[in-house]
């Protein structure tokens, strides 16, 4: 893997990619990969990345990452069972 990384770095350098662009692209790919492994769950991904969830969220916003494809339409389960419907009592007069 080290040889592959060195070859990639050499290729990026020779093609004129700036350091800041290379770091930004690496962050994007690395974070998206971890998010995909965790099905878009930012808490789990942040734990694996060794960062706070708020830091991950801020980094996602800074990098303008689109998480819709990662989540695959998955939604959170409801917090609790729906509340029962309460019938109003009629007062006889």
Image: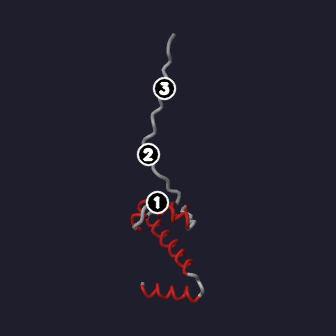
| Front disc: 1 or 2 | 1
Q: Is the residue 55 above or below the residue 77 in the image? A: below
The mark nearer the N terminus, 1 or 3, is: 1
| Front disc: 1 or 3 | 1
SS at mark 2 in the image: loop
The mark nearer the N terminus, 2 or 3, is: 2
SS at mark 1 in the image: helix
Depth check: 24 or 87 in front? 24
Tell me residue 85's x, y (percent): 48, 31
Whether residues under marks 2 and 3 lie with C-beta atoms below 8 angstroms apart, the answer is: no
| Res 37 label | none
Q: Is the residue marked by circle 1 packed among few (<14), some (14-19), or many (20+) residues within 10 Å?
A: few
* Residue drawn 46% across the image and 61% down it: 42
Tell me residue 90's x, y (percent): 50, 18
Q: Which residue is mark 1?
A: 54
Tell me residue 78's x, y (percent): 45, 46
Q: CA distance from mark 2 to mark 3?
A: 24 Å
Q: CA distance from mark 1 to mark 2?
A: 22 Å
Q: Is the residue marked by circle 3 packed among few (<14), some (14-19), or many (20+) residues within 10 Å?
A: few
* Residue drawn 55% across the image and 63% down it: 61
Q: CA distance from mark 1 to mark 3?
A: 43 Å
SS at mark 3 in the image: loop
Q: Which residue is mark 3?
A: 87
Q: Is the residue marked by circle 2 packed among few (<14), some (14-19), or many (20+) residues within 10 Å?
A: few
| Front disc: 2 or 3 | 2
Q: Which residue is mark 2?
A: 79
């Amino acid at each position: 893997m080290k040889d592959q990384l060195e070859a990639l770095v050499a290729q990026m350098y020779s093609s004129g990619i700036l350091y800041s662009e290379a770091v930004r692209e690496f962050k994007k790919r690395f974070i998206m990969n971890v998010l995909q492994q965790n099905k878009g769950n930012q808490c789990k991904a942040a734990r694996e990345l060794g960062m706070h969830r708020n830091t991950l969220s801020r980094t996602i916003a800074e990098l303008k990452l689109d998480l819709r494809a990662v989540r695959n339409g998955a939604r959170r389960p409801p917090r609790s069972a729906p509340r029962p419907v309460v019938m109003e009592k009629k007062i006889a007069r």
